[in-house]
Amino acid sequence: MTPSDSNSPPAPKLSDARTPILIVDDNPQFASVLRKILEGVFHYTNITTVDSVNKAFSLINAAPHQFRILFVDYRFPSGENGVQLLQRLSSAGFLKGKAAFLITSEPNLDNFKQSMAAGVVGVVAKPFDREDLRRQLEKAERILLSENIDSF
């Protein structure tokens, strides 16, 4: 723990309705469905949606602590993919203290391995399943909590 870490207030739980979330998906229908589930089922109130990898990186680069939960689509028309964004964010140190999820309609072992290596806490399959999202968010909460526990 660095000295500046000890002066900052503890981060709110991921289950806090005010937790800032960023959805990165070029498909407005999928982004809308995910947003509606997050708002309606989990009662989140602070959700931002962008449709490109570059917009997402710019937002996070400008305010690294703005978002606590990231949902990043795997495939984008630009040729970039969500794993590349997550790798850039991880390399810049922007995933620390965040729960990042890869969302994909093509869940497979390769994109799972790539995303885990980039610092993702889970892969969420499209179409979205509420119970799977609940399990993923609960798992992310446990992971972030364990990262914040000081060893003795």
Image (spheres, helix red, strand yellow):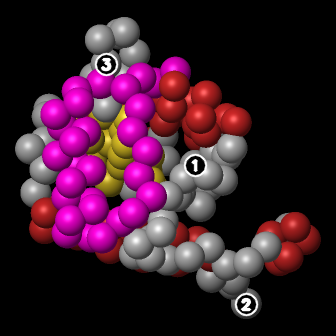
The residue pinned by badge 3 equals 76
| Label 3: how many Cα within 10 Å (few below 14, some 14–19, many 20+) | some
Q: Position of residue 136 (x, y in %)?
A: 28, 64
Q: Position of residue 121 (x, y in %)?
A: 39, 56
Residue furthest to the bottom in view is 152
Q: The disc labelled 2 sits on which kind of residue?
A: Phe
Is 31 positioned to the left or the right of 71 in the image?
Answer: left
Extent of the magenta region: 26-54
Of residue 123 and residue 76, the one placed in the foreground of this image is 76
Marks 2 & 3, CB-CB < 8 Å contact: no
Q: Is residue 33 visible?
A: yes
Residue occupying image coordinates x 45% and y 24%: 53
Disc 3, SS = loop
Q: The disc labelled 1 sits on which kind of residue?
A: Leu
Q: CA distance from mark 1 to mark 2?
A: 25 Å
The residue pinned by badge 1 equals 95
Of residue 26 and residue 109, the one placed in the foreground of this image is 26
Position of residue 52 relative to residue 79, above or below, is: below
Q: Any magenta on residue 60?
A: no
